[in-house]
Image (spheres, grey):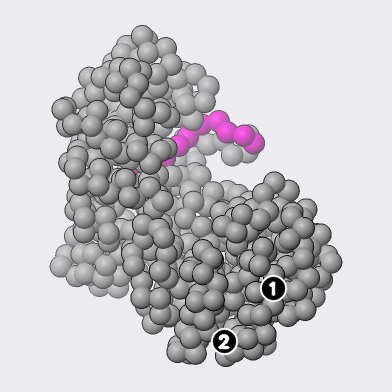
Amino acid sequence: MASSDNLTGPLTELETSVVDVNVLVGPDVPASRSTGAADVGELRRRFGIGHALVRSSAAIRVARERGNRSVLDLAGEEGVSAVAVASALHLDRLPDELDTAVKAGARAVWVEYANWALETEAARRLLRVVEATGLPLLVPHLHPAAAARLGALTARTKTPVVLVEARYPDFTEVVPALERYENLHVETSSLGSYEAIECMARVVGHERILFGSGAPVRSPLSPMYAVLQARISTAAKRAIFGGNAARIFGLGSVPTATVSMTVPERLFDVHGHFFPAPWEVPEQSGEPLLGELAGFGIRTQVASSVPAIMGDLEAGNEQTVRACQAQPGQLGYLVAHPDDIGLAEEHIRKWGDAAGIVGIKVHAEIAGVPTSSPQMARLFDVLADYGRPVKIHNAGDGWEPALVAIARKHPRLPIIIAHAGFHRPQPSAATVVNGTPNVHIELASSKADIRDARDLVHAVDADRVLFGSDAPLINPAFVLGVYQDLGLPEPVLERVYWDNGERLFGGYR
């Protein structure tokens, strides 16, 4: 697709330099997940990454000094720079370790510390040591108050601080902190919520957003697609992909490559929502978004009402019925709560045969009722009589064997595991799919471990894998990156994108 610097809107292709500020290398468990120089080289070749900032897992998990030495050796490779890890452990030795790293060419310091919300002397001392290096800092965002604490502690020196893996549940703290402290920046590996890139750029400017993949844990395609599809200028996208990092980390010229996205011809999305929603994400009208979602390839979506999930069942389920009537191609789940089985039966009688209503959504976590509870088993007895697909967000220890028992009791009832696990794809979900004739999965998540997702989908029959986006809570482009990084052949992906969903829900449309 042709582009110009003043073009604003989604792209599927862009010639740009890419700097990845969030790459991990080193030992892992199982050992097959350990990574080294060859893996970083393959990452750069496959995704067109001109320069990677790499830290050592050994420096975080095993021995800081030894791990930092290993990544400094790796940084001799072209297009790779070392990120030295700093932590409060053995703080007296840290200044000499960091001095060695700086002299060896380290470009940044990764600050490994979990208690930024606390006014601790250890936090202040650690930051004084790392700031003395003169290098920018990369800091995992592990607590809602971390952004404000970091901003306050670094405001005097104005050291550039990049918040790593900041997600939408913390945006009520992250965004005001970014507005207040101009030295704070954010990277993209967890900016998976709907329009997150646009919102960040609008509030604090695109100059403070840096591309980070989170590889090898996260798929680089997810943030790449999110940036490509963002409604910001081409110049801003180029800055996010590489220009901002090159400036902040002093990288000089970075080679360019073509970053591209394949938009499927059609997606049957089995995981959508109607708003309003009590989360820090863009407000939506509550009406179907199919016209907007078509830009991601979504032609049909099965959605449930967030108000119903949060407890307003009457108004929420009525909202879903109205939305399905108003928009061709929009399908809906009625929401059922396991603590209100009588109301679930009433709503099925009232709306179960309404146009576009094709199934039931159960959210065990928000309902506060574990999948293994007697209430959940009783609810599924009722839902089995209705007979239409049930999508469940599971909760509680032992949800896997509990769902196996439910599915085996009702073998003709189609069941979908939302997120293919608890909030994210989990390999343990394969035991549920493979142990039953009627359980399916969809992979919607803004924090998917791509390695777990691959292990899961390659362990089950591909005909049990569905496409789910969680839009408009999550950006469909971000989720699509996960699907396209699973390693599935294109004909199999096409079944996942459309055929499997159409087969499951087509008879009820």
Q: Nearer the viewer, mark 1 or mark 2?
A: 1
- Vertically, is 107 above or below 384? above
Q: Residue furthest top?
A: 92
Residue 337 visible at all: yes
Whole-percent x, y for residue 258 in the image: 33, 60
Residue 86, image x and y in percent? 37, 23
Q: Residue at x 47, y 55 (%)?
A: 446
Reading the image, the residue beneath label 2 is: 356
Q: Say which mark, if any, is on residue 447.
A: none
What is the crowding at mark 2: few (fewer than 14 residues within 10 Å), some, or many (at least 20)? many
**Is residue 379 shown left or right of residue 64?**
right
Looking at the image, which is closer to me, 9 or 154?
154
Residue drawn 33% across and 24% down? Answer: 119
Which mark sits nearer the N-terminus, 1 or 2? Answer: 1
Q: Which numbered marker is on residue 342?
A: 1
Q: Are marks 1 and 2 in contact (CB under 8 Å)?
A: no
- Residue at (19, 53) in percent of width and height: 205
Q: Residue at x 21, y 55 (%)?
A: 203
Q: Nearer the viewer, residue 389 or 434?
A: 389
Is 21 included in the stretch rendered in magenta?
yes
Screen quadrant of the C terminus = bottom right
Looking at the rendering, the stretch of residues picked out in magenta corresponds to: 16-30
Most foreground residue, 401 or 364: 364
